[in-house]
Image (tube, rainbow, N blue to C red):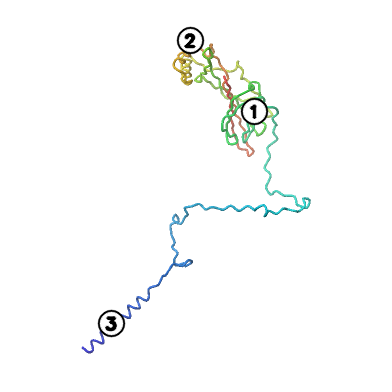
């Protein structure tokens, strides 16, 4: 037994020393230190590394008046300024519009109608548009001219729209259902000047309509005119015996004229523009 206790004592001391050594291997992390690479956490997914706000670039402060230094160098001693940018290519010499008239300036081409005054449609930006619409206020289209004052064109075509209107003691009633359009016809001319012809009363062709077509057009027109029932009946009765669009109190009139302008821009790219001028009955 006397030999047993020393052996047990040695075993216990050895176990105690071993446990102390294991505890001494624990690192003391302490507080996180800025710049310590061991505390950086790297996120492998890029969507979680992106910012949720837009970076703002502060504007550079403008110098105050007292900070701006005046150049006291005499003008004669200053070198002439040199431009490093290349000059923009100039368009071919164009005929200048003279006198009063309607100027329609698209980005690729400029059109001029002498002696014409017209009101343009709202919010039409000709620099970004392929078409333009106007309401004629004064001037005559038939026998007039279309002049190209800027741009290169290859062809100009024209067509018109005819309408039917009724006039009697009840007033004026436009029958929109009987509108008719002519086919596109190339215009004659040269040197960027084209003649407007064929818009007189002898050449304006009306739509071919039967008596039933006329009565239906009258019914649509009175409804669109927001008339009361009594007024509608009066109009329908007044036109009950009409059999032709040229029979009184009906008449044919020029409703609108359209031009189609085809050409190429400065870069050789083809373009097409359309212009319409509406005419009151």
Q: Which residue is mark 3?
A: 12
Q: Which residue is mark 1?
A: 102
Q: Quadrant of residue 190?
A: top right
- Does dot 1 land on a helix, a strand or a loop? strand
Quadrant, the N terminus = bottom left
Q: Quadrant of residue 266?
A: top right
Q: Distance from label 2 to label 1 (Cα)?
A: 43 Å
**Are discs 3 and 2 less than 8 Å apart at CB?**
no
Residue at the image position 70 percent from the left and 27 percent from the top: 99
Please state the horizontal and vertical placement of residue 205, each as a whole percent of the image: 56, 17
Residue at the image position 67 percent from the left and 24 percent from the top: 115
- Does dot 2 land on a helix, a strand or a loop? loop
Q: Earlier in the sequence, mark 3 or mark 1?
A: 3
Q: Residues within 10 Å of mark 3 (few under 14, many from 20)?
A: few
Q: Earlier in the sequence, mark 3 or mark 2?
A: 3
- Does dot 3 land on a helix, a strand or a loop? helix
**Are discs 3 and 1 less than 8 Å apart at CB?**
no
Please state the horizontal and vertical placement of residue 181, each as a whole percent of the image: 54, 22
Please state the horizontal and vertical placement of residue 58, each as a whole percent of the image: 57, 53
Q: Earlier in the sequence, mark 2 or mark 1?
A: 1
Quadrant, the C terminus = top right
Q: Which mark is residue 235?
A: none
Q: Quadrant of residue 229?
A: top left
Q: Nearer the viewer, residue 138 or 273?
A: 138
Q: Which residue is mark 2?
A: 241
């Amino acid at each position: 037994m006397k030999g047993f206790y020393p052996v047990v004592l040695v075993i216990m001391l050895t176990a105690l020393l071993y446990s102390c050594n294991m505890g001494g291997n624990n690192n003391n992390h302490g507080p996180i230190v800025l710049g310590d690479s061991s505390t950086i956490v790297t996120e492998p997914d890029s969507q979680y590394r992106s910012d949720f706000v837009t970076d703002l670039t502060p504007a550079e402060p403008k110098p105050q008046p007292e900070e701006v230094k005046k150049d006291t160098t005499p003008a004669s001693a200053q070198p002439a300024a040199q431009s490093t940018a290349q000059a923009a290519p100039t368009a071919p010499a164009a005929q200048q519009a003279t006198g009063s008239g309607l100027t329609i300036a698209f980005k690729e081409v400029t059109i001029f109608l002498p002696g014409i005054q017209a009101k343009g449609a709202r919010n039409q930006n000709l620099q970004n548009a392929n078409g333009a619409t106007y309401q004629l206020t004064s001037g005559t289209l038939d026998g007039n001219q279309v002049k190209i004052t800027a741009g290169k064109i290859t062809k100009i075509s024209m067509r018109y729209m005819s309408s039917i209107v009724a006039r009697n003691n009840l007033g004026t009633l436009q029958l929109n259902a009987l509108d008719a359009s002519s086919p596109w016809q190339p215009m004659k001319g040269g040197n960027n000047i084209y003649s407007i012809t064929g818009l007189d009363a002898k050449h304006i062709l009306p739509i071919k309509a039967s008596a039933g077509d006329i009565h239906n057009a009258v019914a649509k027109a009175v409804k669109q005119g927001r008339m009361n029932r009594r007024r509608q009946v009066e109009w329908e009765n007044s036109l009950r015996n009409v059999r032709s669009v040229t029979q009184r109190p009906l008449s044919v009139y020029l409703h609108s004229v359209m031009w189609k302008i085809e050409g190429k821009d400065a870069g050789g790219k083809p373009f097409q523009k359309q212009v319409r001028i509406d005419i009151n009955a």
